[in-house]
Image (cartoon, rainbow, N blue to C red):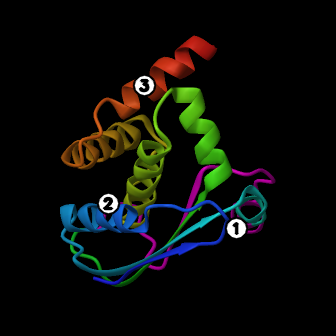
Amino acid sequence: MPIYILNHQPKPIKKSRLAQLAKATLLSEHAGEAEITILVTDDITVRRLNREYRKQDRSTDVLSFAQQPSDKPIDGASGLLGDVVISLPTAIQNAAQYGIPLEEELALLVVHGCLHLLGYDDETERGNQRMRQRETAILTQFGYRNVWERHYKSKQIAN
């Protein structure tokens, strides 16, 4: 299961941890033969990609580019699955806003991005709930607890 981690910004990251999270996510969906690339980069790059491919002229925390697009979760995917692109500056902002360590925010973004590659969608209430359940189960295996609860609590306070 090839998982490539590319760090295209100056801050060091724990590549091995990100690879472990990606691998666990793929294995949880029986996609042990899949290949992915995770790019950690800056807001400018993510904004450009978001504008070019999603027609949204703004940066975001994570983008996923599936090579095997599907409108439902893929079980047992193999081959080149796709790319996950993470904006480190946005991840840093999110971590501060939600009161969680950066490592935890990056963990969430890797799992979230990989699940999108596997066909999960969070655009509907049902899809969002299913995706959050999968994310929580995977993150809990790595000792990250209540990540989404802290995100939601922070959003409620802000509103």
Q: Quadrant of the N terminus?
A: bottom left
Q: Amino acid at mark 3?
A: Arg
Q: Which residue is rendered at x = 62% and y = 60% of the image?
A: 11
Which stretch did the figure color magenta? Answer: 49-74
Q: Which residue is rendered at x = 76% and y = 68% of the image?
A: 52
Where is residue 49? Give x, y as percent.
72, 67
Q: Mark 3: which secondary structure?
A: helix
Callouts 3 and 2 close, C-beta under 8 Å = no
Where is residue 68? Give x, y as percent.
43, 78
Q: Mark 1: which secondary structure?
A: helix
Disc marking residue 150: 3
Q: Amino acid at mark 2?
A: Leu
User: Going by the image, does 13 lie left or right of 42?
Assistant: left
- Few, some or many residues within 10 Å of mark 2 (<14, 14–19, 20+): many
Q: CA distance from mark 1 to mark 2?
A: 26 Å
Where does label 2 land, which residue? 21
For this rendering, which residue is in front, 45 or 132? 45
